[in-house]
């Protein structure tokens, strides 16, 4: 465990998912007057739990001294173990209201969401044969999650004070609709979750549970965060880093580049999101066929997010034909 800023301890908890380029998720323990604030929780695995417990022991703490848990968004790698830590510590659990809504359908009663996802893939052009595999691509992750609902629901704009820290909750929709960051203005710190990562481009996808135009919202959220006076960024993956504004500019350019590539793909003839996804160079090694189902689905959802942004900007129009949605350049 590293004390990355006096009073903030950084732990890397392992992620072991086939085909994933993420090796770990970062969780942060903030030492306060009334116990620790845990920011993000990792997967619920014996290895994660062990590292958290040992980390706390190293600094003379204990799981029961965690008095608050804040989860930036409910993706399994950030949310999975929150319920278990809450059970053991009695901590208050903080989450954005839009993330709270995702918990039931995604992690408690999945059946309806699976039906919706299958339909979603179908109308976006995925042929029947790979649909079932793509639909079920993340079903297994449920085993890493202890579903738990927040005690305190956030909307953005709240202040969370602990020890010498005063964090402002920033609602940063895009990567997930209720994603939040924590900003400590006096210390110029940003706990960025998956909103901004140092080298990985956060995935922005449009799926059955998405809000409208998630990529457009993501750009707005990037703009809002770019204005802040930030020194050190404590991200949800990879390593803490400096240089928030240039990193945001890189991410923006990456998406602009992909927008142009996708626009070219729908210039000559209308295509479904699936057909477009097959045309895009995804930056993974090997071709489409070598991608894991999880990544294929992510790529289709990301293509959709780009197409919907361009529909909102009137660069692309969409029309339904034979039960499928087709996009073409205007
Ligand atoms: Zn995430
Ligand atoms: Zn993540």
Image (cartoon, rainbow, N blue to C red):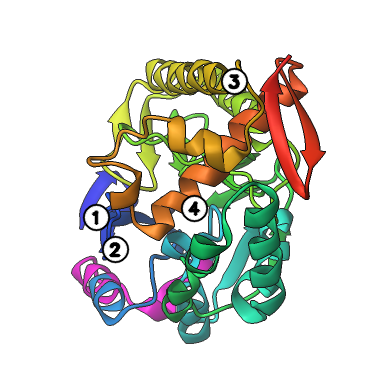
First reached walking from the N terminus: tag 2 or tag 1: 2
Q: Give the range drawn in magenta.
A: 52-68
Q: Does residue 47 sit above or below 234 in this rendering?
A: below
Tell me the quadrant of the picture where the N terminus can be found.
bottom left
Marks 3,1: beta carbons within 8 A: no
The CA span between labels 3 and 2 is: 30 Å
Mark 3: give few (<14), some (14-19) or many (20+) Cα within 10 Å: some
What residue is shown with label 3? Answer: 223
First reached walking from the N terminus: tag 3 or tag 1: 1
| Number of the label disc, if any, that sits on residue 47 | none
The CA span between labels 2 and 1 is: 5 Å
Is 64 part of what is drawn in magenta?
yes
Is 69 part of what is drawn in magenta?
no
Q: Residue at x 40, y 34 (%)?
A: 201
The CA span between labels 3 and 1 is: 28 Å
What residue is shown with label 2? Answer: 15
The CA span between labels 1 and 4 is: 20 Å
What residue is shown with label 4? Answer: 297
Left or right, 65 with respect to 173, comes to left
The CA span between labels 3 and 4 is: 27 Å
First reached walking from the N terminus: tag 3 or tag 4: 3
- Front label number (4 vs 2): 4
What residue is shown with label 1? Answer: 23
- Front label number (3 vs 1): 1
Helix, strand or loop under label 4: helix
């Amino acid at each position: 465990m590293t004390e990355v800023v006096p009073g903030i301890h950084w732990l890397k908890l392992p992620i072991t998912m086939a085909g994933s380029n993420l090796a770990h998720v970062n969780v942060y323990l903030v030492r306060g007057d009334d116990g620790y604030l845990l920011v993000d929780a990792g997967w619920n695995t014996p290895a994660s739990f062990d590292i958290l417990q040992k980390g706390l022991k190293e600094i003379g703490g204990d799981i029961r001294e965690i008095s608050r848990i804040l989860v930036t968004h409910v993706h399994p790698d950030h949310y999975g173990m929150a319920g278990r830590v809450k059970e053991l510590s009695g901590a208050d659990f903080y989450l954005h209201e839009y993330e709270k809504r995702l918990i039931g359908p995604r992690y408690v009663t999945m059946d309806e969401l699976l039906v919706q996802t299958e339909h979603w893939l179908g109308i976006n052009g995925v042929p029947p044969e790979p649909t079932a595999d793509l639909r079920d691509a993340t079903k297994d992750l449920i085993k890493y999650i202890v579903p738990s609902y927040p005690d305190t629901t956030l909307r953005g704009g709240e202040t969370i004070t602990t020890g010498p820290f005063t964090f402002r909750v920033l609602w940063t929709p895009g990567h997930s609709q209720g994603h939040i960051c924590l900003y400590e203005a006096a210390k110029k710190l940003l706990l960025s979750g998956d909103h901004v990562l140092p080298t990985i481009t956060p995935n922005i996808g449009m799926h059955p549970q998405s809000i409208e135009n998630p990529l457009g919202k993501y750009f707005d959220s990037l703009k809002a965060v770019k204005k802040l006076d930030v020194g050190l960024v404590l991200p949800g993956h990879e390593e803490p880093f400096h240089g928030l504004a240039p990193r945001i500019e890189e991410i923006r350019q990456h998406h602009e580049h992909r927008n142009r590539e996708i626009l070219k793909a729908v210039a000559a003839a209308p295509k479904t999101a699936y057909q477009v996804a097959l045309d895009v160079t995804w930056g993974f090694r090997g071709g489409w066929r070598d991608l894991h189902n999880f990544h294929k689905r992510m790529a289709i959802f990301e293509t959709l997010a780009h197409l919907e942004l361009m529909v909102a900007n009137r660069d692309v129009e969409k029309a339904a034909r034979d039960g499928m949605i087709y996009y073409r350049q205007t």
